[in-house]
Image (cartoon, rainbow, N blue to C red):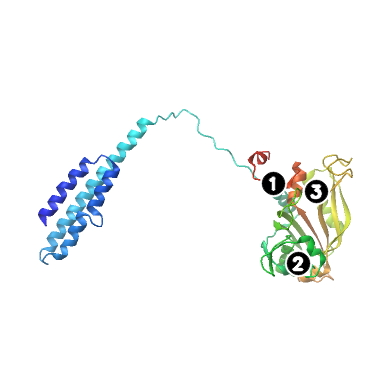
């Protein structure tokens, strides 16, 4: 065994010293310590020796293994240093040259508008509430006074996963969830930003878009409070000279309901192509919370009232930045995004 190990050591040390590349050095290591390597086979032979000779032979094997591993590591380090030095000689680095400037990222205009809306309403004392994008039919429709046979459901034709689950068509379900969570505490004063989904796709509609809905429930809430809050929002978003008007409308979850128009920010109300000569642009829907919706949220409709509103973020962004096609917001064209 001693003679065998000396032969392995002599031959291996010579091969390691003569190795000229890291690949050649890896082959030597496999030949020594691999599954069928010389040191591995010598270790297996220990079991066939007499019991009295095994301790001495085992010590010789371990001593040889340690010696060859140190020699291999030293040679590997030397070859690595030589390779690095050769690379540095080939590659000239001028440390005085300016570094590569990476393009800075930009915030998406939709995120900018959502942040602006949140800042405005946080300043008015509202808090931010969130809810699931995969919603139940109950929260998306029935709790909002839209029973299964209600014709207004057709206007919000959405994407169903099962008969009871769908991608929410509005963030209004968050209003019901917020009332359920907070009842009987007052006031309930929240905004609910998030993605919603409807079966629309053209220059002014997208199958996925963003909405911010607001809800205020308390004792003595009036339509005048709704108008005051929305006028403050519009002026903070589009400028202090903006005016609003309220037109009667219909929403199943509010009564009375109103569409909110803003005086045209492009012509100042004189009439232009964008406002179709009227001087007004429709901006959002709103109204006093329907008593049935208050009841579904757990509140007594005889003692509290509330208002709600919903605004499309894409519509606000298009008006704020003069964008004429909603699809530009989702094209991921860096030339478009750089403008913001």
Q: Under tag 3, what secondary structure?
A: helix
Q: Which label belongs to residue 141?
A: 2
Judging depth in this view, the residue of 243 and 46 nearest the camera is 46
Tell me whether circle 2 and circle 1 mark residues in contact (CB < 8 Å). Answer: no
* Mark closer to the chain start, 2 or 1: 2
Tell me whether circle 1 and circle 3 mark residues in contact (CB < 8 Å). Answer: no
For disc 1, the marked residue is: 329
Q: Is residue 157 above or below residue 340?
A: below
Are there few (<14), some (14-19), or many (20+) residues within 10 Å of tag 3?
A: many
Left or right, residue 138 beside residue 63: right
Determine the image quadrant of residue 75: top left
Quarter of the C terminus within the rendering: top right
For disc 3, the marked residue is: 234
Query: What residue lies at 71% left-to-right and 63% top-to-bottom?
Result: 174
Determine the image quadrant of residue 264: top right
Query: What residue lies at 16% left-to-right and 62% top-to-bottom?
Result: 46
Left or right, residue 201 beside residue 73: right
Q: Under tag 1, what secondary structure?
A: helix
Q: Position of residue 4 (x, y in %)?
A: 12, 54
Q: Under tag 2, what secondary structure?
A: loop
Residue 204 visible somewhere in the drawing: yes
Judging depth in this view, the residue of 115 and 40 nearest the camera is 40
Quarter of the N terminus within the rendering: bottom left
Query: What residue lies at 50% left-to-right and 30% top-to-bottom?
Result: 98
Q: CA distance from mark 2 to mark 3?
A: 28 Å
Q: Position of residue 108 (x, y in %)?
A: 66, 45
């Amino acid at each position: 065994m001693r003679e065998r190990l000396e032969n392995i050591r002599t031959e291996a040390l010579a091969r390691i010293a003569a190795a000229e590349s890291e690949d050649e050095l890896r082959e030597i290591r496999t030949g020594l310590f691999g599954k069928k390597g010389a040191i591995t086979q010598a270790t297996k032979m220990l079991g066939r020796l007499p019991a009295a000779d095994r301790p001495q032979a085992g010590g010789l094997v371990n001593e040889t293994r340690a010696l060859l591993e140190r020699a291999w590591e030293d040679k590997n380090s030397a070859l690595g240093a030589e390779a690095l030095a050769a690379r540095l000689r080939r590659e000239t680095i001028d440390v005085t040259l300016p570094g590569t400037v990476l393009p800075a990222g930009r915030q998406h205009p939709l995120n900018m508008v959502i942040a602006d809306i949140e800042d405005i309403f946080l300043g008015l004392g509202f808090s931010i509430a969130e809810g699931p994008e995969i919603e139940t039919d109950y929260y998306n429709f029935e709790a909002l006074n839209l029973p299964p046979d209600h014709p207004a459901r057709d206007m919000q034709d959405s994407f169903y996963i099962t008969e009871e689950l769908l991608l929410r068509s509005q963030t209004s379900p968050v209003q019901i969830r917020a009332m359920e969570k907070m009842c009987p505490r007052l006031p309930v004063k929240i905004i609910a930003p998030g993605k919603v989904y409807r079966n629309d796709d053209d220059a002014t509609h997208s199958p996925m878009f963003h909405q911010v809905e607001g809800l205020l429930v308390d004792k003595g809430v009036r339509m005048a409070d709704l108008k005051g809050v929305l006028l403050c929002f519009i002026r903070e978003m589009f400028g202090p000279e903006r005016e609003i008007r309220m037109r009667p409308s219909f929403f199943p979850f509010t009564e009375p309901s109103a569409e909110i128009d803003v005086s045209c920010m492009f012509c100042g109300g004189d009439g232009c192509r964008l406002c179709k000569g009227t001087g007004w642009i429709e901006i959002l829907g709103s109204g006093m919370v329907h008593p049935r919706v208050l009841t579904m949220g757990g509140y007594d409709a005889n003692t509290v009232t509330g208002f709600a509103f919903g605004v499309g973020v894409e519509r606000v962004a298009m008006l704020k930045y003069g964008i004429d096609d909603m699809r530009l917001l989702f094209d991921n064209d860096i030339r478009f995004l750089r403008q913001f």
